[in-house]
């Protein structure tokens, strides 16, 4: 029997974690939101409220729905606050050491029936599962950004993931009104295996002086009909996450075609991580984004 998921824990209240909490609460599920500090959780809740209010303004949901959804999200200041969850989704920083530490800390706090999932963009599900006490109840549930808007969720089984875990995850995504696609556990799965090398190539085009930020983004928006230019998209994803995914592809597939562009490394070293840092390939501190090169 697949577990019926009613209470969802989310570890990491950043752009993905708060989006996951948002869609779960709106679908009527109870949510427990965790991050390293209470302040980060509060910031996550404020973002969720702002995004729900935007949906109300657009007429997509009613104000009662917004209030009810917010009422279903409770802060979990430590991992013990996630004990009663049927499913816990780890959506913390894209760094294997950080994720392993979280999983090791999390397992003793959870009920044996709890399914554990990771929202990683690229890291091996099998390797992360090995850091837990329940590889058979561990799965990759990869939401896309922004979670409330994007229809797709990739499901990735680790080598030990059992069928009831997969079925429960699939039913959970169905409850959120989203569509699943299934990927094998290879570096960056499907979407990012294809998307991130394109973004990295756009950064090489900038690095080599073939085009400016504006000409590259205009070229791909109008020439390939992409809704966002690749550099705009990189800023949106977060340049630290982009670099991490390229490093996982490079290490995991051992092919030089995946080498991260040195300019991407430089931006990350500068702390210019994109929209979340208010500066990346564009500067977001003014009224309109301004290209930084
Ligand atoms: P983010 O930087 O916005 O948020 C990460 C959050 O994790 C931060 O709030 C940080 O404080 C928190 N965190 C770090 N260590 C923690 C710990 N020990 N316990 C609890 N919280 C901790 O990053 P994000 O963009 O939300 O990415 C989160 C995950 O989602 C990553 O694995 C990323 O690869 C994946 N993802 C990102 C995107 C995207 O477009 N940004 C898309 C799909 C998946």
Image (spheres, rainbow, N blue to C red):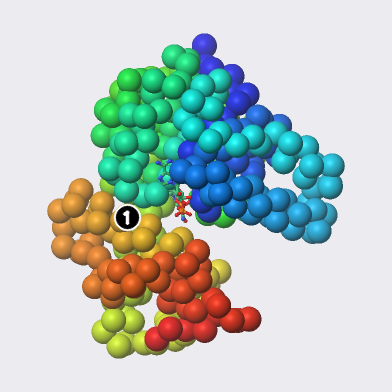
Look at 72% across and 41% down and name the residue there: 70
Secondary structure state at the residue bearing disc 1: helix
Residue toward you, 30 or 46: 46
The residue drawn where x is 65% and y is 29% is 30
The C terminus, quarter of image: bottom left
Instruction: Kindly identify which residue carries mark 1.
Output: 245
Residue in view at x 20 percent, y 48 percent: 252
Q: Name the spot of residue 256 as percent of width and height, x first.
A: 16, 62
User: Which residue appears farthest toward the top when viewing the image?
Assistant: 1
**Disc 1: CA contacts within 10 A as few (<14), some (14-19) or many (>=20):** many
Q: Nearer the viewer, residue 2 or 76?
A: 76
Tell me if residue 15 comes above or below residue 67 in the rendering: below
Residue 182 visible to an observer of this rendering = no
Q: Residue at x 53, y 53 (%)?
A: 15
Residue 63 placement (x, y as % from top left):
84, 47
* Image position, residue 80 (x, y; %): 49, 25
Residue 114 visible here: yes
**Ligand 1 is within 8 Å of the C-beta of the residue at disc 1:** yes
Whether residue 135 sits left or right of residue 8 in the image: it is left
Coordinates of residue 59 in the picture (x, y in percent) = 82, 54
State whether residue 152 is above or below residue 73: below
Q: Locate residue 244 relative to residue 77 in the image: left or right.
A: left
Question: What number of labels is visible?
Answer: 1
Q: Is residue 57 above or below residue 170?
A: below
Place residue 287 in its image quadrant. Answer: bottom right
- In the rendered image, the vertical position of residue 9 relative to residue 275, given as above or below: above
């Amino acid at each position: 029997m697949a577990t019926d998921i009613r209470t969802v824990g989310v570890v990491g209240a950043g752009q993905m974690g708060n989006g996951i909490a948002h869609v779960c609460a709106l679908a009527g599920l109870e949510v427990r939101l965790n991050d390293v500090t209470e302040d980060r959780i509060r910031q996550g809740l404020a973002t969720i409220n702002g995004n729900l209010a935007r949906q109300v303004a657009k007429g997509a949901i009613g104000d009662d729905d917004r209030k009810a959804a917010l009422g279903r999200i409770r802060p979990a200041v430590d991992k013990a606050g996630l004990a009663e969850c049927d499913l816990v989704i780890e959506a913390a920083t894209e760094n294997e050491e950080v994720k392993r530490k979280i999983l090791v800390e999390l397992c003793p706090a959870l009920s044996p029936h709890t399914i554990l999932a990771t929202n990683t963009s690229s890291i091996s599900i099998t390797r992360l599962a090995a850091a837990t006490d329940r590889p058979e109840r561990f799965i990759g549930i990869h939401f896309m950004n922004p979670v409330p808007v994007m229809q797709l969720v990739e499901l990735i089984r680790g080598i030990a993931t059992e069928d009831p875990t997969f079925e429960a995850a699939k039913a959970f995504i169905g409850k959120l009104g989203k569509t699943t696609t299934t990927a094998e556990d290879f570096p960056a799965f499907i979407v990012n295996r294809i998307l991130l090398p394109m973004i990295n190539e756009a950064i090489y085009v900038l690095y080599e002086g073939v085009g400016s930020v504006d000409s590259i983004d205009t070229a791909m928006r109008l020439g390939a009909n992409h809704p966002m230019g690749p550099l705009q998209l990189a800023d949106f994803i977060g340049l630290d996450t982009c670099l991490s995914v390229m490093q996982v592809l490079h290490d995991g597939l051992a092919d030089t075609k995946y080498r991260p562009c040195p300019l991407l490394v430089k931006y990350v070293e500068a702390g210019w991580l994109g929209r979340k840092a208010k500066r990346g390939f564009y500067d977001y501190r003014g009224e309109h984004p301004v290209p930084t090169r």
